[in-house]
Image (cartoon, helix red, strand yellow):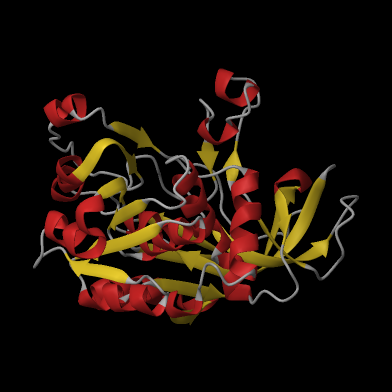
Amino acid sequence: MKQAVMTAPGRIEFRDVPAPTPGAGEVLLRIKRIGVCGSDVHVYHGRHPYTSYPVVQGHEFSAVVEDPGGSGLAAGSRVTALPQVTCGRCPPCRRGDDHICDALKVEGFQAPGVAQELFAVPAERVVPLPESFSLEQGALVEPAAVAVHAVARAGVVAGRNVAVMGAGPIGNLVAQAARAAGARVLAGDLSGYRLDVARRCGIGHVFNAGETSLGAAVAEAFGEAGLDVGFDCAGATASVGALVETVGKGGRIVVVAVFGCRPEVDLGLVQDRELTIAGTLMYRREDYERAIEAVAAGRIVTDPLISRHFAFDDYAAAYRFIDAAGDQAMKVFIDL
């Protein structure tokens, strides 16, 4: 079978390797769509701190069951799978938080990913998809699960005023997940294109953070009620700083973005206003299941996020397109 291997930053080689033989308790999948995410782009540019080369990429994907083994899954059915490889023994794993396993490895980064025609995965990590799902929707379950988990980290958001800083694919999905959970949502970004995509996804309040302050945008969107919860999906000192300055007393800020630098945050305001700052990492299986339910019900809209498809043989061209398109690239797919 054909496999794509990133041998060094910016260099992808295709190799003909033996197809995997599924072991006991494993399911053999035929990969159909792979989504390219921001972390993948960091690997392409050699800027991911926890990935070495060579690496087989691919962690957000849809597939069909090639060989169900003894899983009870139907051959040919559409599925995806969680990409976390965990130890099962550390304190987080033992208490049910295996998504923050002390020895966590993620396929496509510290473990081989799905950038190949066939992939064997433990049956317990396989997640069935509705037959009504497109292959693109299936590949978007992973980032949607990131968003669902992030919103859960904020506690109850129904009826509350929420701001999402950053309207790229993850920020967009966080905004949609918060709206699906009953929040009133404001999304900010420096990109007019991404704000337009947010509007097409049904986010009613958006603002350009290069032209309007978060405080002014909150006042216009929510009036005197102010801001209850903020999500930082931009990963910049300015964005998280604006949230600390604007979220109301007793409010909550969830850090979703991966920061490439150490931001300066006014902890005096955090203390004085009794703000809570929470981190969020990846997802649990139930987040996948809730994301699937939200997409199937139309509470999370995916079509406006799709930017471009590339054939498997053109894997490197997908990265060149993302670099050239800049903020106009949302979700790019590799088709097998």
Q: Position of residue 158 (x, y in %)?
A: 47, 51
Q: Quadrant of residue 116?
A: bottom right
The quarter of the rendered structure image containing the C terminus is bottom right
* Count of numbered circles on the image: 0
Residue at image point 14% right, 42% down = 245
> Left or right: where does residue 90 sit relative to residue 216?
right
Spot occupied by residue 23 in the image (x, y as percentages of width and height)? 81, 45
Is residue 80 left or right of 45 when viewed as pictured? right
Q: Position of residue 152 (x, y in %)?
A: 49, 43
Question: Residue at (17%, 59%) from the top-left corner?
Answer: 219
* Residue 66, above or below 162: below
- Asked if residue 326 shows in the view, the reply is yes
Residue extending furthest toward the top: 91
Q: Position of residue 34 (x, y in %)?
A: 54, 67
Residue sitting nearer the eye, 129 or 164: 164
Question: Which of the 4 image quadrants contains residue 16?
Answer: bottom right
**Residue 336 visible, this orientation:** no
For this orientation, the residue located farthest to the front is 224
